[in-house]
Image (cartoon, rainbow, N blue to C red):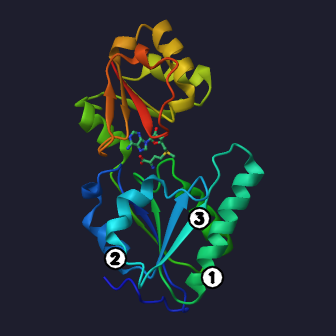
């Protein structure tokens, strides 16, 4: 694979790379390949000055003496205008390099097309720079890593699985938890109180398991989810409810 070759119009390629859930060994061979060869690596972070979770996963594969590392700021906010501005800025910064014929690898934890910043980057890139060729390198999602850590099967036979953010509507959370055999609640950190209330109401507390930083050296698994109430939880946390 020639990662440095500019396409016919002289523009570089954009790679959306899933770098997995935390353990650097869960990067795919393809992700490692692209990461090592790309002249520009775009690394998202939510707090300026902090290196971020993704950085820890990929740093050993990079060579700052020959690769440009772009730390791009994406604020953790629900303000639509602020988000749109940050996605647009990131695309413009990458596009400057792409226009010079340089390939860019944009890294995201887990998979790049599942609840990822790259989904928005891709949308803006397609709209504003349609000449740029995009390749996606899928990654091991945190959902799969968390299930493996907790040794909880996600589905079997005719089972149905729902994946949804715990920050969504109460109605949707209750619907999913009532109807699906397995429910994966991501983004639970700030919503854990209401999740516990709903699990309690539906008598599902004993079917739930909490997993934080799955596959990383700071992984945590909690079976008694009621004990999470009032705790300050890591953003990289989810709950699997398996009935
Ligand atoms: C913006 S989503 C990114 C999902 C990611 N694209 C994936 O495929 O796993 C962030 C949420 O994913 C979950 N998450 C990501 N990495 C995790 C990990 N290592 N362990 C547990 N949950 C994780 C958390 O619920 C977190 O709030």
Q: Dividing the image into 4 quarters, which one contains the N terminus?
A: bottom left
Q: Which residue does the image show at 29% across and 44% down from the upper left?
A: 215
Using the rendered image of the protein, determine whether residue 156 is visible from the camera's viewpoint: no
Q: Is mark 2 within 8 Å of ligand 1?
A: no
Label 1: element kind = helix
User: In this rendering, would 213 be left or right of 233?
Assistant: left
Q: For the residues marked 3 and 2, what is the alpha-carbon distance in whole angstroms?
A: 19 Å
Residue nearer the viewer, 12 or 217: 217
Q: Dividing the image into 4 quarters, which one contains the C terminus?
A: top left
Q: Is residue 115 above or below residue 64?
A: above
User: In this rendering, would 116 be left or right of 110?
Assistant: right
Q: For the residues marked 2 and 1, what is the alpha-carbon distance in whole angstroms?
A: 21 Å
- In the rendered image, which residue does mark 3 sit on? 72
User: In this rendering, would 53 be left or right of 23?
Assistant: right
Q: Residue 201: x and y, percent?
A: 50, 7
Q: Residue furthest front?
A: 49
Q: Which residue does the image show at 74% across and 45% down from the upper left?
A: 79
The mark lying in front, picked from 1 and 3, is 3
- In the rendered image, which residue does mark 2 sit on? 36
Q: Is residue 157 above or below residue 171?
A: below
Contact (CB < 8 A) between labels 3 and 2? no
Q: Residue 81: x and y, percent?
A: 77, 52
Q: Which residue does the image show at 44% across and 81% down from the upper left?
A: 67
Q: Residue 13: x and y, percent?
A: 48, 79
Q: For the residues marked 1 and 3, what is the alpha-carbon distance in whole angstroms?
A: 14 Å
Say which label, 2 or 1, has the lower sequence index: 2
Q: Residues within 10 Å of mark 2 (few under 14, many from 20)?
A: some
Q: Residues within 10 Å of mark 3 (few under 14, many from 20)?
A: many
- In the rendered image, which residue does mark 1 sit on? 96
């Amino acid at each position: 694979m020639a990662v440095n070759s500019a396409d016919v119009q002289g523009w570089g390629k954009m790679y959306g790379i899933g770098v997995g859930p935390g353990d650097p060994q869960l990067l795919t061979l393809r992700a490692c390949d692209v990461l090592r060869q790309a002249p520009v690596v775009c690394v998202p972070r939510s707090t300026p000055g902090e290196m971020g979770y993704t950085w820890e996963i990929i740093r050993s594969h990079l060579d700052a003496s020959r690769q440009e590392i772009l730390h791009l700021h994406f604020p953790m906010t629900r303000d639509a205008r602020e988000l749109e501005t940050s996605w647009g800025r990131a695309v413009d910064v990458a596009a400057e390099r792409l226009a010079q014929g340089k390939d860019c690898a944009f890294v995201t934890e887990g998979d790049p097309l599942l609840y990822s910043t790259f989904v928005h980057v891709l949308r803006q890139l397609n709209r504003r720079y349609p000449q740029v060729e995009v390749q996606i390198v899928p990654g091991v999602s945190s959902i799969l890593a968390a299930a493996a850590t907790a040794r909880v099967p996600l589905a079997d036979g005719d089972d149905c699985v729902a994946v949804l953010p715990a920050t969504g509507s109460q109605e949707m959370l209750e619907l999913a938890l009532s109807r699906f055999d397995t429910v994966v609640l991501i983004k639970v950190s700030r919503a854990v109180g209401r999740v516990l209330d709903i699990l309690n109401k539906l008598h599902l507390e004993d079917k739930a398991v909490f997993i934080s930083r799955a596959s990383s050296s700071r992984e945590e698994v909690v079976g008694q989810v009621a004990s999470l109430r009032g705790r300050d939880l890591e953003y990289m946390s989810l709950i699997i409810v398996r009935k």
